[in-house]
Image: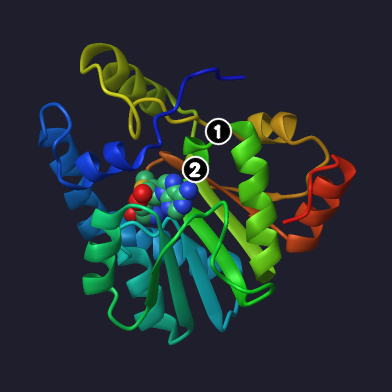
Amino acid sequence: MQDLEHDNSVDMWNKYYASKRGNSIFEKAVHLARKKYFKGTFAETVIKLSGKSTSYLETGAGTAQTLDYICKKTGARCVGVEKTPRAYEIGKNIAKECEIILGDALKLPLPNKSVETSYSLGLFEHFSKEEQKKFLSEQARVTKKTVIIEVPTRSPHMITIMWFNRNIRKLKGVWADDELFTKSYFKNKFPKLKFKYHLSVSSLFMTCWFVLKPEDIELFLRENHFPRS
Ligand SMILES: C[S@@+](CC[C@H](N)C(=O)[O-])C[C@H]1O[C@@H](n2cnc3c(N)ncnc32)[C@H](O)[C@@H]1O
């Protein structure tokens, strides 16, 4: 298991969105790639993995570019929850047809079973294991059909980027101490939790996806005596 201390503070995220961490060139390049390429490829993957869906929730929606793309492409009801004020403000401006809420993934401000598909992109890896269970519990509570989790994959280039940012650029937080995943790593971390695995070629082997059913998450949490949300 990876044993890094994760910085998931609002302060870290505010600096990231303002490109004010260390030398800002890296962040600017990431934001540009997000806008020009990844928002489309992520949105298409969510649509493919969810099947037909009349509503989507993105938890940790960031600048909500992917949510906006999904909303325009599918016409579905789209809701984003985001905890960092700077990202929330940018997201509200970008995704004008979506409902963007300032809120916490670990205490979602949404009723039970109020969306068909919930997904997160680049969020799960920033939580501790206990927070990840709470996150799963909240995703299962609000979702009727499909929960999708996208995380960075444990590929040589991702290991190198994280190492470089952590050890040479002395960064903490996103792109530095992210937990990196493989299929077997997820399976070992959450034994007996059922999921489907998808490795994304279009995201240049930087990310992988776990697709779960809310009832399987609930069963897993019950069997592990995790308190109900
Ligand atoms: C790597 S960013 C990804 C943003 C967006 N999903 C995207 O793909 O561009 C992770 C986001 O999760 C947000 N976040 C972190 N912890 C959160 C929490 N507990 N509740 C809601 N959002 C959170 C951060 O503020 C950040 O905007």
Image location of residue 3, percent across then percent down: 54, 17
Residue farthest to the top?
167
125 left or right of 14 in image: right
Amino acid type at mark 1: Phe
Q: Dot 1 corresponds to which residue? A: 181
46 left or right of 197 in image: left
Looking at the rendered image, the quarter that the C terminus falls into is: bottom right
Count of numbered labels shown in the rendering: 2
Seen from the viewer's position, the closer of residues 211 and 127 is 127
Residue 66 placement: quadrant? bottom left
Q: Dot 2 corresponds to which residue? A: 151
Q: Residue at x 43, y 30 (%)?
A: 178
Above or below, 145 relative to 222: below
* Distance between the alpha carbons at the discs numbered 2 and 1: 7 Å
Residue farthest to the bottom?
75
28 left or right of 186 in image: left
